[in-house]
Image (tube, rainbow, N blue to C red):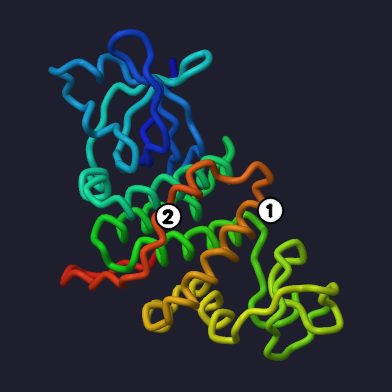
Amino acid sequence: MPVYRDEAVVLRTHKLGEADRILTLLTRRHGKVRAVAKGVRRTGSKFGARLEPFMVADLQLYEGRTLDVVTQAESLGSYGAEITQDYASYTAANAMVEAADKLTEAEGSLQQYLLLVGALRSLARAEHGPSLTLDSYLLRALALAGWAPSFQDCARCGRTGEHTAVVVQLGGVVCDDCAPPGTPRIARSTVALLGSLLAGDWEHAESAAASDRNQASGIVAAYTQWHLERGLRSLPHVSRETTPTAPTPREATPT
């Protein structure tokens, strides 16, 4: 059977039999892959710990009829241990991998892979607040999938201006003429925060007020739920703490 190597993020795992595990992987070159890791639940497994959710690994697999089989695994990013020690980071990471699972298919999606790896690394290093990291990831992942929101020009007619009406069904902020009756309004500072999260402007995002962060998170959640239809089961469990997390001295990596 054909053998191949690829880098992968572990999105989900399921028990199989007494010692095996089924993995859902987002790979660098092969898109989303489902594979079996045999014997990884045994105490003496050589690479079981490298195949837990949120881990990034260099894998060797061979193609099976229904599921591929992992034969080797070398750790590239051991993010799971750090993420699971903090509840806010853990719940944010769960929402990220669930979104990645829904937004990617069998074909390759290098940009989605790199975005997810960067977001998980940022969570593990506590570079930014978990809620901000999650909101930025969701907006950028949806943009890569073809659903880029507009937080500057009117999402319907393209009119420029400082719009404060938000309609997630129309794709972001809209002008007064395009806003349906009763459309809720948000502060201009919240619109600016949403634009910063989409662009990765962390200096502005981290200086935002708690009220803007909370309002922005609600809009991001609504926008995500709308485009993913069924939504994310893990999103209601995300901790939305607004206390900013100080960056570590390690080199920051954009998410």
Q: Nearer the viewer, residue 71 or 112?
A: 112
Q: Which residue is mark 1?
A: 226
- Residue at x-position 35% and y-position 61%: 130
Element at label 2 = helix
Residue 36 lies in quadrant? top left
What residue does disc 2 label? 114
- Left or right: where 47 falls relative to 112: left
Q: Quadrant of the rendered structure where residue 185 is?
A: bottom right
With respect to residue 184, does 114 lie above or below? above
Secondary structure under the numbered disc 1 in the rendered image: helix
Position of residue 39 relative to residue 54, above or below, is above
Q: Residues within 10 Å of mark 2 (few under 14, many from 20)?
A: some
Q: Position of residue 9 (x, y in %)?
A: 38, 41
The x and y percentages for residue 196 are 49, 78
The three-letter code of the residue at mark 2 reads Leu
Please give the name of the residue rendered at 31% of the width and 67% of the height, measured from the top-left corner: 253
**The N terminus lies in which quarter of the figure?**
top left
Specify which label sits upstream in the sequence, 2 or 1.
2
